[in-house]
């Protein structure tokens, strides 16, 4: 199986798993992944992540121009901003996951670090997560906001919209965005209950041991 065929299958398999587990619903969410030749595969606009066809995945050139397949998601500026500002990015996943969106709407959520450090894997897979303002879906300003971070964050949450995570490959990005949603759920479950998160010393130890961007 060619690299492109395998990646098409993986995108559809991962997307269906996320859809079936309620991490995104309806025709929401999108995924992209970069091939070794610099071109990009991306889920089509208006498609459901639970019912993707590998043959209809959009194929774009390195400049994000459509080559083949169905028309790509309107969130191209969001995806391209991560590829352009984080050289190691091999995939980008965007969901409309419930707990992440809920946390993004709360007034006391910290824009610069919206997830409390409750577990080591949230720190290891995500680093600090930036909350970005609300934008209309498809607005190129979303991409501008990510570019404004100058590559410092691999994960953001669009207020009232959903999380976006870049990873070294499709699996890494998928695992990280699931960690983001799980941590948001834990945050809401333990809110006001005096939950004991990781200490500064414990976070520093994780950052040093696993060479985490923090």
Image (cartoon, rainbow, N blue to C red):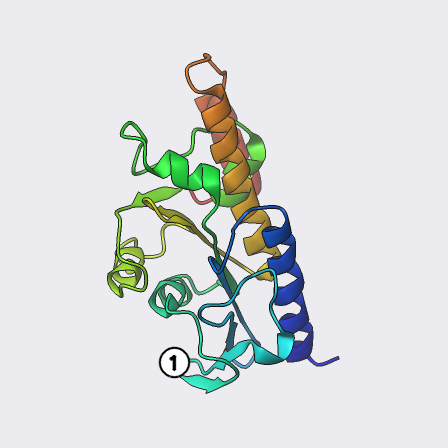
Other-residue count near label 1 (Cα within 10 Å), few / some / many at <14 / 14–19 / ≥20: few
Q: Nearer the viewer, residue 162 or 200?
A: 162
Q: Residue at x 48, y 45 (%)?
A: 97
Residue 45 appears in the rendering: yes
- Quadrant showing the C terminus: top left
The residue that disc 1 covers is: 63
Q: Nearer the viewer, residue 198 or 138?
A: 138
Q: Nearer the viewer, residue 117 or 77?
A: 77
Q: In the picture shown, does residue 43 fall above or below 214?
A: below
Q: Residue at x 44, y 70 (%)?
A: 45
Residue 208 appears in the rendering: no
For this view, does 88 lie left or right of residue 107? right
For this view, does 118 lie left or right of residue 85? right
Q: Residue at x 36, y 56 (%)?
A: 151
Residue 84, quarter of picture: bottom left
The percent position of residue 150, horizontal first and vertical second, equals 30, 57
Q: In the picture shown, does residue 172 fall above or below 43?
A: above
Residue 66, quarter of picture: bottom left
Q: Residue at x 51, y 32 (%)?
A: 185
**Residue extending furthest top?**
194
Q: Secondary structure at mark 1?
A: loop
């Amino acid at each position: 199986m060619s690299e492109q065929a395998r990646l098409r299958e993986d995108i559809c398999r991962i997307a269906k798993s996320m859809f079936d587990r309620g991490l995104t619903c309806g025709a929401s969410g999108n995924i992209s992944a970069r091939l070794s030749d610099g071109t990009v595969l991306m889920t089509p606009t208006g498609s459901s992540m639970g019912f993707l066809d590998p043959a209809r995945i959009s194929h774009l050139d390195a400049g994000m121009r459509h080559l083949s397949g169905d028309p790509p998601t309107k969130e191209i500026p969001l995806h391209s901003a991560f590829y352009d500002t984080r050289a190691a990015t091999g995939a980008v996943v965007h969901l409309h996951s419930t707990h992440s969106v809920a946390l993004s709407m709360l007034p006391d959520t910290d824009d610069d670090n919206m997830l409390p450090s409750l577990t080591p894997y949230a720190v290891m897979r995500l680093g600090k997560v930036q909350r970005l303002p609300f934008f209309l879906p498809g607005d190129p300003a979303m991409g501008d906001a990510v570019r404004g971070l100058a590559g410092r964050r691999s994960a953001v949450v669009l207020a009232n919209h959903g999380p976006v995570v870049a990873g070294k490959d499709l699996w890494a990005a998928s695992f990280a965005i699931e960690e983001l949603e799980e941590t948001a759920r834990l945050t809401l479950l333990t809110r006001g209950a005096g939950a004991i998160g990781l200490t500064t010393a414990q976070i520093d130890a994780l950052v040093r041991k696993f060479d985490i961007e923090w």
